Image (cartoon, rainbow, N blue to C red):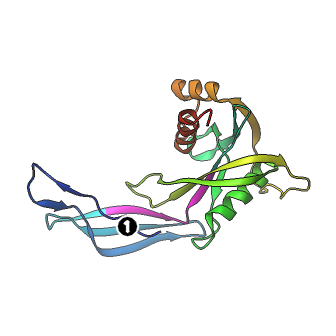
Amino acid sequence: MKCLKPIIIKQNGGEIMDFTEKTIQRDIKYSGRIFTVTQDIVELPNGKTSTRDLVFHTGAVAVLVIRDGKMLLVRQYRKPLEMHFLEIPAGKLDSKEEVPLEAAKRELEEETNLVAEEWVKMMEMVSTPGFCDEKITLFQAKNVTVKENAKPADEDEFVEILWMPLEEVMQKIQTGEIADAKTIIAAQYAWMHKGE
């Protein structure tokens, strides 16, 4: 993923401050198909050094689908948190080179047996910039239909498909029943643009 431009802040009209950290040493702790874990020694803006534990990720996609005022969600178990989550369809890129739109089409079909006539790239977001470079590209899929002989779901993926009224989705966000960040962002976008 290309680096985002560093944020440079003027304080009280004074000089511009650059908080960029220079990598002095990178130790790869793990390298797999989806992500790499490193421990970096960095030089801080004040000249001191510090250690950063980092995750470099291939990236992911997520898909917002609204039909008749209802939002498409999948319910699935998330092992790191040992609980079930309600989320929009999503998945990892197979590689850094994979085109996000193609991954989004694949994930929607595999998870829900749906295909869309129209795709709109909504935004790119960074999920956890404090330690990970994972970028999620959010798409909206419009005019969805069920596909006969759709791509099969991954063998290790078990999901339940739900169509939930957008008002109920927003209530579940307020109560914490929906806690997934990409889903919250997509729902808030849909709420702001309902009726358009």
For the residue marked with disc 1, what is the amino acid? Gln
Which residue is nearer to you in this view: 103 or 140? 140
- Give the image location of residue 167, x and y in percent: 62, 25
Q: Is residue 192 left or right of residue 63?
A: left
- Give the image location of residue 137, x and y in percent: 56, 56
Q: Is residue 171 left or right of residue 150?
A: left
Residue in the image at 63% along x and 53% along y:
120
Name the outermost residue toward the right: 148
Judge the density around disc 1: few (<14), some (14-19), many (≥20) Cα neighbours within 10 Å.
some
Please state, as top left, top right, bottom left or bottom right, where the C terminus lies in the image. Answer: top right
13 is within the stretch colored magenta: no
Query: What span is colored magenta in the figure?
Result: 52-62
- Give the image location of residue 93, x and y in percent: 62, 64
Name the outermost residue toward the front: 196
Which image quadrant is residue 15 in?
bottom left
Which image quadrant is residue 193 in?
top right
Q: Is residue 30 left or right of residue 18?
A: right
Could you tell me what secondary structure mostly forms the magenta stretch?
strand
Residue in the image at 13% along x and 51% along y:
11
Per the image, the residue denoted by label 1 is: 39
In the rendered view, tell whether residue 126 sits above or below residue 56.
above
